[in-house]
Amino acid sequence: MMVDLFSTQPSKVFGLYPSKGEIKIGSDADLVIWNPASENTISSKTHHQNCDINIYEGIKTMGSAEYVVAGGNMLSRMGL
């Protein structure tokens, strides 16, 4: 359901389907392994941007990307 909502349908709206939004031979797909149980707190100290403030500082979140396969390379959460 999430794949359809966040990937397949938008790729159809923008005319990119099936080269985007589908996992099959010939499609260009980046994959995310999502952990819905992960708890985090937003902080500028842990982000990868070159800034020292975040307007969402201190907000607690649920869920995070544990692994991403992008361009054929596997990235762990620590490498994101």
Image (cartoon, rainbow, N blue to C red):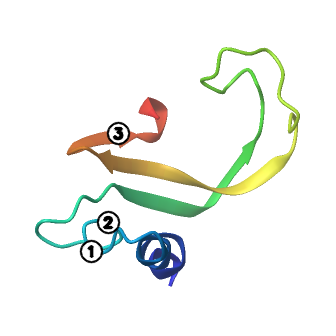
Judged from the image, the secondary structure of the residue bearing numbered disc 2 is loop
Q: Position of residue 19 (x, y in %)?
A: 25, 67
Contact between labelled residues 1 and 2, with CB atoms less than 8 Å apart: yes
Please give the name of the residue rendered at 32% of the width and 65% of the height, measured from the top-left corner.
Answer: 20
Query: Which of these two is toward me, 11 or 53?
Result: 11
Q: Which label was assigned to residue 75?
A: 3
Amino acid at the residue labelled 2: Lys
Of labels 3 and 2, the one closer to you: 2
Query: Which of these two is toward me, 1 or 64?
Result: 1
Of labels 3 and 1, the one closer to you: 1
Contact between labelled residues 2 and 3, with CB atoms less than 8 Å apart: no
On the image, numbered disc 2 is attached to which residue?
20
Amino acid at the residue labelled 3: Leu
Nearer-N-terminus badge (3/1): 1
Task: Tell me the CA gap for discs 3 and 2.
Answer: 20 Å
Contact between labelled residues 1 and 3, with CB atoms less than 8 Å apart: no
Nearer-N-terminus badge (3/2): 2
Decide: few, some or many residues near mark 3? Use Cα within 10 Å; few <14, some 14-19, many ≥20. some
Please give the name of the residue rendered at 24% of the width and 58% of the height, measured from the top-left corner.
Answer: 28
Q: Is residue 45 above or below residue 80?
A: above
Q: Is residue 18 above or below residue 64?
A: below
Amino acid at the residue labelled 1: Pro
Q: Which label was assigned to residue 35?
A: none
On the image, numbered disc 1 is attached to which residue?
18
Q: Position of residue 23 (x, y in %)?
A: 25, 71
Task: Tell me the CA gap for discs 3 and 1.
Answer: 24 Å
